Amino acid sequence: MCRSRSVVYPVRASAIRQYPPPCPWFCIRSPIRPHNKEGDIDPDELTLATSPFLYSIDVPYATFNTTGHINRNEEAVWQMVAGIASNLRLVRLHGIRLGNSLELRRAMQQPLPLWEGILRASNEESLPVARLGRLSKLTFGSAGILIANKLAQLGECTRFSELCTLELKSRILPEVLHTLAQMADGNMLANLRDISLSVTSYDDEDQRYLDELAVRMVTALQPLGTLSKRDIFSQAFTALLQTHSVALRRLEFLPTRHPDAELPFYSLSVDHVQKLSSQCPSITDLRLLIPRTKGDAHEVQIYLSNGSRSLQRLQIDIANVQSSGTRPKTFNVLNVLRWIGRSWICIRNPGDVDNTVAQEPEKAERMEAGEYLPKDQDEKSAW
């Protein structure tokens, strides 16, 4: 075995060049260590982390693992983003949920020691020098809550002005939206074309503040191609149409509400849906939340308006809510999902357009396996 890094590093880099690592999950082991037992990064892992052929990574991250060891992978990724992985462009971060253990509890009570970084003990002159990175896509996964200092950390690592896609699937607090609005005002998101946000609302005052921030951000951004937004409200929807209607190709609009908040759902009216149809002609992918109103003329008109569009993909989320925004006590969403979430064949005679027969082709196999559902003997009443 050759111990000289000046010899081994080019050989390893050549192997990575010949067989580029797809890295669907990027997690190196040597930065995961007990408290006060920092050590050098494994040479093979260092080669991978600094490879110029690394383009896209998915990173599971947490400050500790279940056994209480400190996990420095997130900090390592920030350094990679900052330029030691010079061609890294796509990063997806997924917060992981830890199991419970006494070791983890003890570790969380201790102060977190400073980390000297992934290159701390490297004397290799050919290794890249950290600088400001050039991410084109950044995704924060759905676990946990995203806080504003994460964006501040990223601002020290990459040029936000070159970011094209930003997906914040974690629940974000109002201060994060405030930071994004400030960045948009300062033209720091000039190349952003696709954005996904999930904001949390607790009360009316909070909702109004979020609406104002959303208007600021949406108005300041360049025309978007994709917008996925939760808890977007009346003023923000109007600003969306005024600023991004022509360029918008994909829209996902799913109003949500924190379980502890006593707020009604803000949902799209027939007028909103018709404005989408007339003012956003380029939309080909649409996902909306539609409140059930017992099939009245209002609800039917929403379906008809969506059906008249030239869409490649339409996804409708049904919400059975009362006027107060609460779900009826008799509503059993699990039963509904168990009914709908199966294979169905719908048959309609062209000469009798008012009658449609729905059949489940796999019903015999399901019942033979003992998977009975409510009203199995009367499918019409289940609909």
Image: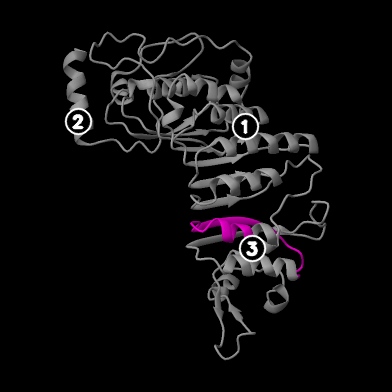
Q: Nearer the viewer, residue 137 or 38?
A: 137
Find disc 3 in the rendering and name its residue. Answer: 338
Q: Would you say residue 278 sits in the magenta stretch?
A: yes
Label 3 environment density (alpha carbons within 10 Å; few <14, some 14–19, many ≥20): few
Left or right of 172 on screen, residue 117: left
Q: Amino acid at mark 3?
A: Arg
Q: Would you say residue 380 sits in the magenta stretch?
A: no
Q: How far apart in space, not on screen, are marks 3 and 1 (Cα)?
A: 37 Å
Q: Nearer the viewer, residue 76 or 348?
A: 348
Q: Earlier in the sequence, mark 3 or mark 1?
A: 1
Q: Position of residue 57 (x, y in %)?
A: 39, 34
Q: Which mark is residue 177?
A: 1
Label 1 environment density (alpha carbons within 10 Å; few <14, some 14–19, many ≥20): many
Q: Nearer the viewer, residue 113 or 258?
A: 258
Judged from the image, the secondary structure of the residue bearing numbered disc 3 is: helix
Q: Position of residue 160 (x, y in %)?
A: 46, 28
Left or right of 143 on screen, residue 27: left
Q: Quadrant of the N terminus?
A: top left
Q: Which mark is residue 15?
A: 2
Left or right of 73 on screen, residue 256: right
Q: How far apart in space, not on screen, are marks 2 and 3 (Cα)?
A: 50 Å
Q: Residue at x 32, y 38 (%)?
A: 22
Q: Position of residue 249 (x, y in %)?
A: 48, 53
Q: Earlier in the sequence, mark 2 or mark 3?
A: 2
Q: Amino acid at mark 2?
A: Ala
Q: Which residues are magenta?
A: 274-296
State the scheme by which the image is colored.
Answer: one colour
Q: Earlier in the sequence, mark 2 or mark 1?
A: 2
Judged from the image, the secondary structure of the residue bearing numbered disc 2 is: helix
